[in-house]
Image: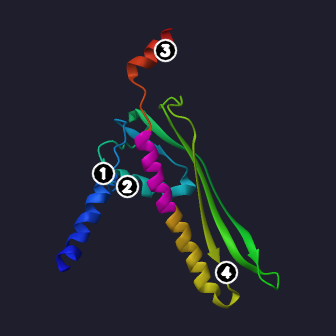
């Protein structure tokens, strides 16, 4: 009976491997040189994205648009907070935090290499008048968590985009 309990984790590991489960690894961005064009008001998100790319593929990031083979262009970054529940006194009891981010990959000349990608994130947060400071901190932590999640989703999407070969662009223009 004791040996059966010792083998149980081994069986669980075998079944996880059989179903195709595997941990997420580093994502390879398929562009040779990438420039991240993010507006100045969004420095934390742009910096986090650059940091993650440098951690896995430091050679692909370039400092200017002219050096790039592809440009990551942020098209929109919208945050909103909406009341979703009220207490008996008519005060907010629960909020929903929403973030909508859109971007696309372009050539340095501005020609689209990908469709516009939209990422929508939501989090629920409760509110209590007797714990105002702690609830404000919780909300700030949730916004930061959403930004970390957003960076990971952007990286996964970047890894799935297929670059347009340079030879095909010239052939399309001539045709």
- Confirm whether the magenta stretch covers residue 158: yes
- Confirm whether the magenta stretch covers residue 19: no
Q: Element type at marker 2?
A: helix
Q: Earlier in the sequence, mark 3 or mark 1?
A: 1
Q: Does 59 sit above or below residue 81?
A: above
Horizontal relation, residue 170 to residue 26: left or right: right
Separation of marks 3 and 4 at Cα, in angstroms: 56 Å
Separation of marks 4 and 2 at Cα, in angstroms: 33 Å
Q: Percent from the top left, x then y, of residue 136?
A: 61, 79
- For the residues labelled 1 and 2, say whether their Cβ atoms are less than 8 Å apart: yes
Q: Earlier in the sequence, mark 3 or mark 4?
A: 4
Q: Percent from the top left, x then y, of residue 5?
A: 23, 76
Q: Does 9 sit above or below residue 53?
A: below
Q: Earlier in the sequence, mark 4 or mark 2?
A: 2
Q: Earlier in the sequence, mark 2 or mark 3?
A: 2
Q: Earlier in the sequence, mark 4 or mark 1?
A: 1
> Residue 127, which numbered label?
4
The answer to which image quadrant residue 93 occupies is bottom right
Magenta segment, which residues?
147-160
Q: Does 16 sit above or below residue 95?
A: above
Horizontal relation, residue 134 to residue 70: left or right: right
Circle 2 sits on which residue? 52
Q: Element type at marker 3?
A: helix
Name the foreground residue: 13 vs 140.
Answer: 13
Circle 1 sits on which residue? 56
Q: Percent from the top left, x then y, of residue 162?
A: 42, 33
| Residue sitting at the far top | 175
3 vs 4, front mark: 4
Identify the residue at image location x=64%, y=61%: 98
Identify the residue at image location x=40%, y=32%: 69
Separation of marks 1 and 2 at Cα, in angstroms: 7 Å
Q: Percent from the top left, x then y, of residue 45?
A: 49, 57
């Amino acid at each position: 009976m004791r040996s059966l309990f010792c083998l149980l984790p081994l069986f669980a590991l075998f079944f996880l491997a059989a179903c195709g489960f595997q941990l997420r690894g580093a994502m390879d961005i398929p562009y040779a040189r990438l420039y991240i064009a993010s507006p100045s008001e969004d420095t934390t998100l742009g910096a986090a994205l650059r940091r993650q790319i440098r951690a896995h593929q430091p050679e692909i990031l370039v400092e200017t648009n002219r050096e790039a083979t592809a440009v990551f262009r942020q098209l929109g970054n919208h945050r909103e907070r909406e009341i979703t529940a009220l207490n008996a006194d008519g005060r907010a009891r629960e909020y929903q935090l929403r973030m909508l981010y859109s971007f696309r990959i372009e050539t340095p000349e501005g020609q689209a290499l990908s469709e516009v990608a939209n990422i929508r994130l939501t989090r629920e947060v409760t509110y209590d008048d007797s714990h105002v400071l702690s609830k404000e901190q919780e909300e700030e932590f949730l916004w930061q968590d959403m930004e970390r999640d957003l960076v990971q989703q952007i990286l996964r999407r970047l890894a799935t985009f297929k670059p347009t070969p340079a030879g095909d662009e010239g052939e399309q223009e001539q045709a």
